Image: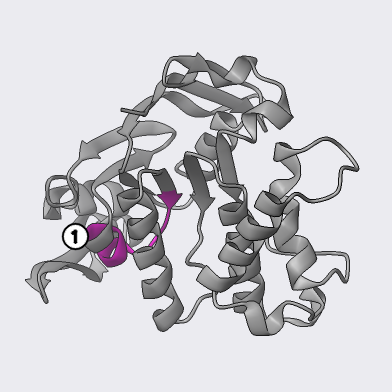
Amino acid sequence: MSVLAIENLSATLSGRRVVDGVSLTAGKGSFTGLIGPNGAGKSTFLRACLGLVPASGAIRLDGTDLSALRPAQRARHLAYLPQEREIAWAMSVEAVVALGRLPHHARFAAPSQRDKAATEAALTRMDLCAFRHRAVTSLSGGERARVLIARALAQETPVLFADEPLAGLDPQHQIALMRLFRELAAEGRIVVASMHDLTLAARWCDRLLLLEGGHAHAEGRPEDVLTARTLEDVYTVEAFIGTAAGGLIVQPVGLSQKKKEENHG
């Protein structure tokens, strides 16, 4: 069974340790939510795993040291959906999605039938077929987000990292995206996504990794991580925690007493 093993990962930016000794093991078919307050190190953790920022520690997939691979080789194992969604060039939606196939063929080589099929499947899955000839720069922020998700799907990697993929999406497309990630996991991929919506994380993810100040504060099943005590300690909020429609509901309702005292201290 495929296993992604991230061991003792640390990253320093501008002389400050942003991620400090974080480990995560995710098996084939898993969907892990990466949560934590702003500045906890979520984005840097994902970028460090991808080799986009200097880091120490080990990142292995089925025993293969991914940090030792060239970027093009690594891109056959790891797909990345970045938080930034600006696209500078007025390329067509189809052309942008097809960029996900670049790691799979030689530079300047014509797209293969498999490349075309993967691109078409990604367009269909993200409901973008009607947009295929539109310039990406003419789309709304939410539509551009779907294009970039499709590009990552076209890459057909065993692991998908997504940084705040729900940002800018309306509730319908947020739920659709979480359903998609759950389906990808059911198909055998490993999905790791950072997010702020605790209810969506609790209802759709198998496990959660909660970061605080660059450290792993808690890791485990959503119901074990998202407790009233943890939310007070890490997020300094009071929250309603309950169940509805067969899943967990986590809704912050106010500042914790500790935070109120800090604000009035």
Q: Quadrant of residue 71?
A: top right
Read off the residue under disc 1.
257
Q: Nearer the viewer, residue 214 or 146?
A: 146
Residue 13 at what x, y percent from top left?
65, 30
Q: Residue at x 75, y 49 (%)?
A: 112
Q: Residue at x 79, y 64 (%)?
A: 95
Q: Quadrant of residue 92?
A: bottom right
Q: Nearer the viewer, residue 128 or 198?
A: 128
Image position of 67 with respect to 243: above or below? above
Q: Residue at x 77, y 74 (%)?
A: 136
Q: Helix, strand or loop at disc 1?
A: helix
Residue 8 at what x, y percent from top left?
41, 18
| Residue 38 visible somewhere in the drawing | yes
Q: Amino acid at mark 1?
A: Gln
Q: Residue furthest front?
A: 113
Q: Is residue 194 magenta?
A: yes
Q: Residue at x 37, y 39 (%)?
A: 212
Image position of 20 with respect to 246: above or below? above
| Residue 260 visible somewhere in the drawing | no
Left or right, residue 187 beside residue 96 = left
Q: Where does the C terminus fall, quadrant-wise?
A: bottom left
- Residue stretch rendered in magenta on the structure: 193-202
Residue 21 at what x, y percent from top left?
41, 20
Image position of 7 with respect to 151: above or below? above
